[in-house]
Amino acid sequence: MSLLSKDIDSAFEGAGSKAGLEIWCIENLRLVRIPKSSHGKFYAGNAYVVLNTILPKNGPPWHDVHYWLGNDTKEVDLAMASDKALELDAALGSCTVQYKELQGLETQKFLSYFKPCIIPLEGAYSSQEAHLNGDTYKVSLLTCKGDHVVHIKEVPFSRSSLNHDDVFILDTASKVFLFSGCNSTIQERAKGLEVVQYIKENKHGGKCEVATIEDGKFVGDSDVGEFWSLFGGFAPIPRDSPSSFQKQSDTPPVKLSWITIQGKLCQTGTDSLHKKMLETDKCYLLDCGAEVFVWMGRHSSISERKISISAAEGFLRDQNRSTGTHLTFLTEGLESSIFRSYFDDWPQKVEPKLYEEGRGKVAAIFKQQGYDVKELPEEDCEPFINCRGTLKVWRVNGDELSLLPVPEQTKLFSGDCYLVQFTYAGNDRDENLFFAWLGCSSVMEDRKATISHMNAIADSTKGNPVLAQVVGDNEPVQFFSIIQKLIIFKGGMSKGYKKFIAENGLTDETYGENKTALFRVQGTSPHNMQAIQLDPLLQVSSSLNSSYCYILQTETFIFTWIGNLSSTQDHDLLDRMLELIDPTWQPTSVREGTEPDTFWNALGGKAEYPREKEMKGYTEDPHLFVVNVSEDEFKVKEIYNFSQDDLTTEDVLVLDCHREIYVWIGCHSNIRSKQQALTLGLKFLEMDILVEGLSLETPIFIVTEGHEPPFFTHFFEWDSSKANMHGNSFERKLALLKGKPQNLEVSRRNSWKAYSRETTPDSSRSQSVSSNGQGRSVSPASMVSGSNSMSSSNHLFSRPAPIARKLFSGSSLHDESLVSSGSPAAEQRSPSQSASYIQVDGSGDCVNFLIYPYERLKVMSNDPVAGINVTKREAYLSDEEFQGKFGMTKGAFYELPKWRQNKLKMSLNLF
């Protein structure tokens, strides 16, 4: 609810009470609300105040305030916009984050409100007329920069404005042209097409032609001739033509300064910063180079905040900073993750909160007994997966895999690792979900082996299954939902665990019928319940909690303990779990507060325990990040207000859902394997971008384009027709623009491995692909970026190679054939230059393979081979080189167990 006073502009009345955007324009020194029909139209002669409100399921609203300044805005309006943004902050209880936005240099968050773009209009806004003045049609040349949000800038209508790095739009009365510089990325071209569509619909009423022009294409197309004729005829574009957007220089060290009430800056720290440096009654400036923050303490006055804003703007002017330097204003308690990341010891923003609410009638009863409880609906934990499927569970014992019989599949040990395969019915085919469950006490050797086994089995499974790494005590809801009735015992059975216990002189606490064991029973229904044996190294009685039910097993008796805050449903799950663990048990039921001495003696004595239940609380909305990976860099950029359209096929993205993360792999991305994707997920957890205290044991799901499971797609407004298109992102947008959407071919549903950079090494982000889908040469500029591009990109669209079957059928973990989806046309070197044919006898089946040198076959090769079966790299080595690398013949190698083959290949960087 908005907070108003006589000092707050009446135009802000009711602001922030509803979710979504609200926009005001400064017109004749007064604030005017902009109708929704005009949202996204900004005039260069005006200043605007923009409010975006998010109403979460729980907790207070979240407000972002932006004041946008057009290039032709009057000085008096500039100052007024800043003051009005501060007024709006006060009206909303001083709990907003404020951003200064300059025309053409807007923040990505601001641009994300107005997809696909903002095209500022000349002139000034007028609320008195039926139409907006300055909105006259004219031929214009625009440059587009950005891959997920787009900066649009009008440039002079001249050939000299064009360059090889950017995407340009020429808007004429009858036709809109998209010109793609040869160094522009596929994603930038695809975004350019979205802008073309926007211009067509909003400036031409949908009635104009659209043409795409490829940089360097001179003849054979009437659109090309028409485009260049508008510039007075064709002439080459200079190679050194500068881009309209210059790269920023290296940023200086981070500096923190206190802003005095006189508006002066007093430096208080640099580089090593601590939260205690920020005093609640003061304002500070944090200079991060490309971005500057003003932090305003909760007890600072309005006048002090105005002084701080003026001081920050004066600081940028005095320092002669780039106009692209972003200025953000933060109130104490609302610090962004980027701001917090500059401090060494910033407390975690999200902390576990104690359970203060009971459920149903239990709440009323125990309020009378001194418990401070309230009723609270249970959090929605919908798994979004068809739980009626087939389950297989293997126990990992180093290099060995043991398939568990069905009765044992629901009984896991915390010192062991397990591989879980769940097959369920999808929309039009069976889907597979693999979990590598790593017990919380398991040894590293077993963990690595489990991941290796999962990758091997998944690679031999039809389709593109979803893979997940899960560490004990951090299971996602999907894991509990598919196993349904789970018991987790302490200890382990693997050789690695037993060896670790022996070498460290530890007591083997592996569960046994004659040992004391305490189980906590939890769950939501008979089809989702768990019994977790608690750690015997802790004082067991302190593990009790009033909101749970427990099973206490000793050598001579069985107790069930019922917490006073547990529900009738909890009691039902307790009875069911007793039957599951041991149907012969005859337990003694004990309610909290009536325990006999024998109960406490078995637990090592009575001790204090929490009478509240820790709640994970309502999870914040997820965040989407695009990940850019090179040999020496790992860069992450957040995509604000994301949608399904942001899942571009050339990218790798991470969806951070706080309790788990999803690594999404586009078909045309540079990720070579799901193991590499898993490594990226671990790196993301390590970086903790949102400074939210992500554990390295947070579950990681690996999802490939075209095979997104329902528990991933429910975070989006999902359109399955978009997920079933083929081609790169530019080709898909072009097909939609021309009204010819192309559905994904059946063969493409299983072709992520063929589309990956492993089999298409030249499909780099900086590669140039023409509008008709054919490859073209890569410019020198793209080579500088470090991509290993080859001379042609036809590999992406060539027909699949003849199928090579059953190379290792004798040693496969599954009986299914392993299929190569490579392309012989993709490798254009002659056999005499780099390859010849070899016949491999794996297990009775003879298959012809080209021979390639080891340096081109290894995973991280600088000159990788295209069109091979990436799960059989070693098969392409010559007999001599194979003997030298593996120390054995190919025949001897193929007789080894599959796990042994994979281990040898991993050691040689061939897996």
Image: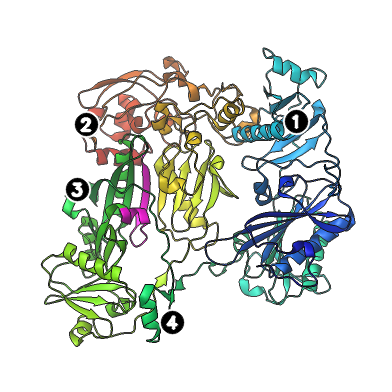
Looking at the image, is mark 3 or mark 4 nearer the viewer? 4
Which badge, 2 or 3, is on the more N-terminal residue?
3
Looking at the image, is mark 3 or mark 1 nearer the viewer? 3
In the rendered image, residue 598, in percent from the top left (x then y), is placed at 18, 84
Q: Distance between the residues labelled 4 and 2?
A: 71 Å
- Judge from the rendering whether residue 339 lies leftward or rightward of residue 632; answer left or right: right
Which badge, 4 or 2, is on the more N-terminal residue?
4
Check disc 1 and give the amino acid type: Asp
Circle 2 packing at 10 Å, graded few (<14), some (14-19), many (20+), is few
Check disc 3 and give the amino acid type: Ser
Front one among 814 and 366:
366
Which badge, 1 or 4, is on the more N-terminal residue?
1
Q: Label 3 belongs to which residue?
A: 402
**Contact flag, marks 2 and 3 (Cβ < 8 Å):** no
Q: In this view, does 144 lie above or below 435?
A: above
Which badge, 3 or 1, is on the more N-terminal residue?
1
Element type at mark 1: loop
Q: Distance between the residues labelled 3 and 1?
A: 63 Å
Q: Label 2 belongs to which residue?
A: 892
Q: Which mark is residue 372?
A: 4
Front one among 517 and 679:
517
Check disc 2 and give the amino acid type: Ala
Looking at the image, is mark 4 or mark 2 nearer the viewer? 4
Element type at mark 4: loop
